[in-house]
Amino acid sequence: MECRSRISVGATRCRYGSSAEGRNRRLDRPTRERILRLALLFWAGLELSPRSTEASEPVFIGRVAINTVDVFGADEVRSFLNEGANALHVVTLDSTVRRLLIFEEGDVYDPAVLAEAERNLRALGLFRSVSVVAGEVRDGVVDVQVNTQDAWTVQIGLSAGSGGGAMRGGIALGEKNVLGLATQLRVAFAKDEDRTYRSVEILTPNFFLPFTTAHVLYGNNSDGSEKVLEILRPFYSTAAPWAAEVAYADTRRDEFTYEEGGAIQSTYGADHFRLLAAYGVALSAREGNASRLSIGLDLREDRFRTASTGETPVDPLPADRQFRYVFLQYEALHSDFLKWNYVHHDERYEDIGVGPQLKLRLGISPAVFGVAEATGIVGAEVGAGCRVGTSGFVQARVAWDSRVGQQLENSLLAAKVLYVRRFQTAPRQTFVAQIAALRGWNLDDDVQIFADARAGLRAYHLRAFEGDTRIILNLEHRIFSGQQLFGLITPGAAVFFDAGLVGSPTRNLRLSEAKMDAGIGLRLAMAWAPVMNVFRIDAGYAFQRDPTGHKGWLISFSTGQAF
């Protein structure tokens, strides 16, 4: 079962550790223990440290103290802008932070659990900084201090972007932390290259049950509507015993087929419906490792019609699709994270997973469920990472997803490798390299694969090159100034190079046909903003022409790093 929660919530009552008696029993079988650990190492690449041969009494968590700080602390208030931001912001309540923790007073103390609780809080996107620190052990008890500093979560103003030469923007009024309760409310009006959006969205944690999130979205767009209702209790920690999800989604809108170069070829209406119910249990959960099994029912319908705008219709329309899957999913993971800054943000820390993960998914939509013919689904995902010295790391991921009928249908294979190397210089600098590949087979008529600015070729327009195969290489050197302007913005810079190959059934991948660009960028980091706290402006030069004849400079701006 895929956990897609936007917020980690609740406080676990699971207890960690084992008694001294239990530890001694295991140590009475050293050969058996060694074989088991070697098998785990072979299967999942886990880095297991030797166990202590000395018995020890468990340590328990005593007092849990919560310390919450406003967007700008007392030593950061330097102007009326800082004071105004604090005045408009409601500080996260201590009780809210406490409910979001995965441990409580009286639990067995485990440093790994505290580290995971810190990562969960950081992942919420509500805080500038988070730390969960244990004090000294006294008489078998340790107190824990939880420190959080809020980010600016009020969303008022304009958003804009021009990635790939296409303008998009809008206005959003919202709050990600209503009354300090971690509830999100958002009212938005926005426009991209395809449509105008008008929506209301609410997301609230601890919905009736601990760890449970409710998400409601209603959108009335220029070409249709969007309705989403989701209630999700994810595997909120490595030791979470179970998870469940119920989700409903109904989207109606106009969709497009595009020519190479970005011109709209035809338009059609598409109605997408999905109803999902799933339940998962932990088969094992200990020492940072977890294996889980989920079962669920996934109902999907995709129906196509003439576009509401009456523009050039596609002929023929894509074939309607209906599936009623019963599926099983197995997941195994090892929790291993780097807590680093100066990677995708500036001084703000982020959690980078380098532990191995495996997901396997099998499902069947049998004809007896009322569909036209029996269809299967298969999926697999493998991810892992490793440290490269003390200043670098590598992450890799491979995922495959496909329907299975009389042949593989809408089959997609994706692979990505990311390398990061930080330099301890003044100013701080980071080199980032990524290579990503995507290959499709027997794609549905409404699915197209492009190599363009959105895929990583930053100096080429949207939908510049089409095919069923693409390989994109990105190289970027990031420079962080470390200097704040007006106490609000930290400027930075980047130099980048992109290259890509595109192939199709009628066009093989050829190195001589690689598309390349290079350029410079400005990065404006906002330490007080939530997760997406980097505004970027890129000026890239395309060395090869696209199908429309474009070659040369393209300026784009957006939020977040390009990759």
Image (cartoon, helix red, strand yellow):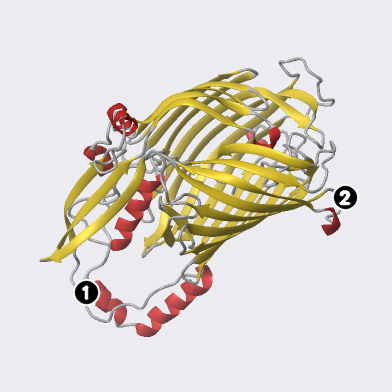
Determine the image quadrant of residue 83: top left
Q: Residue 189, relative to residue 246: is it above or below?
A: above
Label 1 environment density (alpha carbons within 10 Å; few <14, some 14–19, many ≥20)? few
List x then y, in percent, for residue 166.
Answer: 68, 31
Label 2 environment density (alpha carbons within 10 Å; few <14, some 14–19, many ≥20)? few
| Residue at screen point 27% across, 77% down | 25
Is 494 on the left or on the right of 482, as rendered? right
| Secondary element at tag 2 | loop
**Residue 531 or 58: which is nearer the viewer?**
531
Reading the image, the residue beneath label 1 is: 21
Is 263 on the left or on the right of 42, as rendered? right
Q: Amino acid at mark 2?
A: Arg
**Residue 143 or 378: which is nearer the viewer?**
143
Is 283 on the left or on the right of 89, as rendered? right
Residue 203 has which mark? Answer: none
Q: Is residue 185 among what the camera can see?
A: no
Reading the image, the residue beneath label 2 is: 507
Which is in the foreground here, disc 2 or disc 1? 2
Asked whether the beta carbons under mark 2 and mark 1 sit within 8 Å of each other, the answer is no
Is 149 on the left or on the right of 544, as rendered? left
List x then y, in percent, for residue 432.
Answer: 58, 58
List x then y, in percent, for residue 456.
Answer: 67, 47
Q: Residue 492, relative to residue 80: is it above or below?
A: below
| Residue at screen point 72% across, 47% down | 411
Q: Residue 194, relative to residue 106: is it above or below?
A: above
**Residue 113 or 494: which is nearer the viewer?**
494
List x then y, in percent, for residue 238.
Answer: 39, 56
Question: How far, Cα to Cα, is label 2 from label 1?
Answer: 67 Å
Q: Amino acid at mark 1?
A: Glu
Determine the image quadrant of residue 368: top right
